[in-house]
Amino acid sequence: MRKVVVFFDKLEDRIRGFLSHYPILYAFIAGVAIVSFWRGVWEVSDIWGIPPSVSLLAGFLIMIAVGVQVTEFLGSRIIISGLRGDKKLEEKTLKEIEGEEMFLHDLKKEVDHIEKMMEARENK
């Protein structure tokens, strides 16, 4: 099972890396996939005879339980920026955005370094 998970994780990384260079194609493929997925969910609900009100309530409760209700509909970046009192992305200057990107990049490098140190320590 672990090999299957690792395979699909690496496959996803490669596909995402490729498609990130073609944002319009990426958006198109993602849109088709999302609509296809929800069409399938809709059809299965119809086949099983689940009434719309039950489907609405069950879906809402499941999303609340797994923690996606708020972040999916508002976006975690919007929530965090609102809590911190940040400017909207449209209001930021290019210099501010580049500064944030550099900070996040440096932070990721530091986390990766710590992760490697932890793995090395576990392997000893």
Image: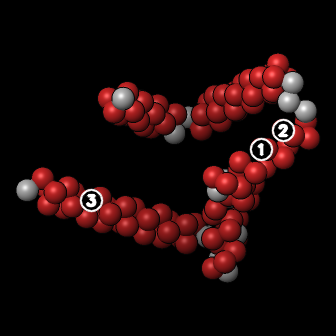
Residue 83: x and y, percent? 66, 77
The structure residue drawn at horizontal position 75% and vertical position 28%, both measured from the top left corner, is: 41
Q: Secondary structure at mark 2?
A: helix
Classify mark 3: residues with Cα within 10 Å, few (<14), some (14-19) or many (20+).
Answer: few
Residue 102: x and y, percent? 42, 66
Q: Nearer the viewer, residue 122 or 117?
A: 122
Q: CA distance from mark 2 to mark 3?
A: 42 Å
The structure residue drawn at horizontal position 68% and vertical position 68%, both measured from the top left corner, is: 79
Residue identifier under label 3: 115
* Quarter holding residue 110: bottom left
* Quarter holding residue 9: top left
Q: Are marks 1 and 2 in contact (CB under 8 Å)?
A: yes
Classify mark 2: residues with Cα within 10 Å, few (<14), some (14-19) or many (20+).
Answer: few
Give the left or right position of residue 4, taking residue 92 as reference: left
Q: Nearer the viewer, residue 32 or 43?
A: 43
Which quadrant holds the N terminus? top left
* Quarter holding residue 96: bottom right
Residue 61, above or below 36: below
Residue 47, above or below 93: above
Q: Nearer the viewer, residue 27 or 82?
A: 82
Lower sequence index among marks 1 and 3: 1
Q: Secondary structure at mark 3?
A: helix
Lower sequence index among marks 2 and 3: 2
Q: Are marks 2 and 3 in contact (CB under 8 Å)?
A: no
Check residue 59 in the rendering and tell me which mark sits there, or answer none. Answer: 1
Classify mark 1: residues with Cα within 10 Å, few (<14), some (14-19) or many (20+).
Answer: few
Q: Secondary structure at mark 1?
A: helix
Kindly give the residue lying farthest to the bottom in the view shown: 85
Closer to viewer: mark 1 or mark 3: 1
Give the left or right position of residue 97, taking residue 121 as reference: right
Residue 101: x and y, percent? 47, 63
Residue identifier under label 2: 55
